[in-house]
Amino acid sequence: MLALTLGACGSGGAGDADVTLQVVVADYGEDGTQAGTGFWKELVAAFEKRHPGIAVDVDRVPHTRLDKVVAARVAAGKAPDIAQTGAFASYARAERLYSADDLLSIGTQADFVPSLARAGEISHVQYGLPFRASTPRLFYNKKLFEKAGLDGPPTSWTELAADAAALREAGVRTPYALQLGPEAAEDETLSWLLGNGGGYVGLGGSWILDSPQNVTALRAVRDRLVVPGLTGAEGAGLNRTEAYRGFVTGKVGMLLAHPALMARADRAHLAYGTAAFPRRQGGGATPTGRTDWLVAFQQRGHAREAGAFLDFLYSTPNVTRYAEQEGTLPVTVPAAEVMRADGHHRALWPFVDQLGGAQFPQLDTVGGPQVTAALQERIAGAVSEDGNPAAVLSAIQHKADSEMSQVS
């Protein structure tokens, strides 16, 4: 069964409502907390009670197929009113979406974490509404660090490599889990690039994939971690799922990970700590951020009703509850302040604090899908023992420039 439909569940049924909103969101299955079903049922019931003329049908689609399902429905002329998606630029450029100005109250728009709101813009108009946001930090196994004689996390790349070497000497199977497999290559890569002052896109909006800073960063990963064998038997091509599993089972000394890993580590009774991912020369690097988006399609003409539902969804209690249940970070400033003031969320505070300064990959721009695919396919090879970071980055840059030239 492709999607689980949560039908209208307020005081009246869909047949009693003037409008039924079609909403498509992700089902994270075993990768999530299983709280999603309850959240959406309760949200819809509360919204319909407050808005008896609007019914809401929520389809939860497996997250691995979400973007393909949404794209297929749009192509078939059956776009939902609201959809969760990882990419929205193509829909915005095709003028299929309502903007945030079309939908949301001024108060709701003002509440978004500014960096998230900016990341949802196309040509300075916000179309993507941030949802399910996250930012990673360096996780480290305290027991393994103590075994290796280490008293804290690394604060530079030199320290990171030295700590990894000490962990290997202490018998740790994977000192540093380098996640450049297809599942999360673009995320891990960006953290290393930012740690050396590089990135994917420059201030002018052009691709800078083959910049000297980026080449130097990947050479350092190759020479300091992969070649000495400090990334374990898998080398550079480890997928995120396997890396997380290795960490909670005590086989990984340290890795870059999102706050969702905390619940799994806590269930495993693992003693761990988190720290800012280090810059090459020392100190904390600019953190990366990631988020899914909610977008509203124009096709069914329900701007008013969709806006009412989104204003309700983005109220502080609902944003806070979703973040708490799903192990994600709040996408609005008031919800972040609520979680920051609650001692029960103390372990999340460093993640909440760094989200505001996070840099997003900007892979939802012209050429972005091609760059993502190329990174997932080739970047692990670039830092392998005989890899050539400069050649690989140059090839990906050429692909991105080619895509840009076709629309300029």
Image (spheres, rainbow, N blue to C red):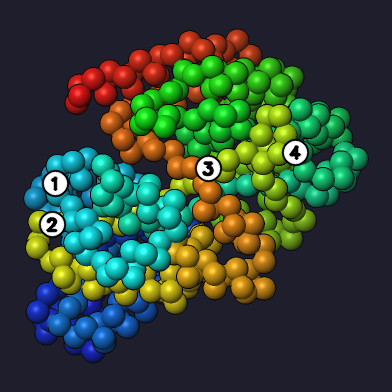
Neighbours of disc 1 within 10 Å: few (<14), some (14-19), many (20+)? few
Relative depth, front residue between 105 and 145: 105
Which sits earlier in the primary sequence, circle 4 or circle 3? 4
Relative depth, front residue between 56 and 299: 299
Which numbered disc, 2 or 4, marks the residue closer to the eye? 4
Residue 392: give x, y in percent of width and height: 47, 15
Q: Is residue 156 visible?
A: yes
Relative depth, front residue between 27 and 140: 140
- Residue visible at 29% across and 68% down? 106
* Callout 3: SS: loop
Lateral position of residue 34 relative to residue 399, left or right: right
Distance between mark 2 and mark 4 Cα atoms = 48 Å
Question: Are the residues at dot 4 and dot 3 in contact (C-beta closer than 8 Å)?
Answer: no
Q: Locate residue 111: give its quadrant.
A: bottom left
Which sits earlier in the primary sequence, circle 1 or circle 2? 1
- Residue furthest bottom in the image: 11
Q: Quadrant of the C terminus?
A: top left
* Callout 1: SS: loop
Q: Pointer 3: what residue?
A: 288
Q: Quadrant of the N terminus?
A: bottom left
Which sits earlier in the primary sequence, circle 1 or circle 4? 1
Number of numbered markers = 4
Relative depth, front residue between 236 and 50: 50
Q: Pointer 1: what residue?
A: 95
* Callout 4: SS: loop
- Residue visible at 64% across and 23% down? 221
Give the label on residue 155, or none.
Answer: 4
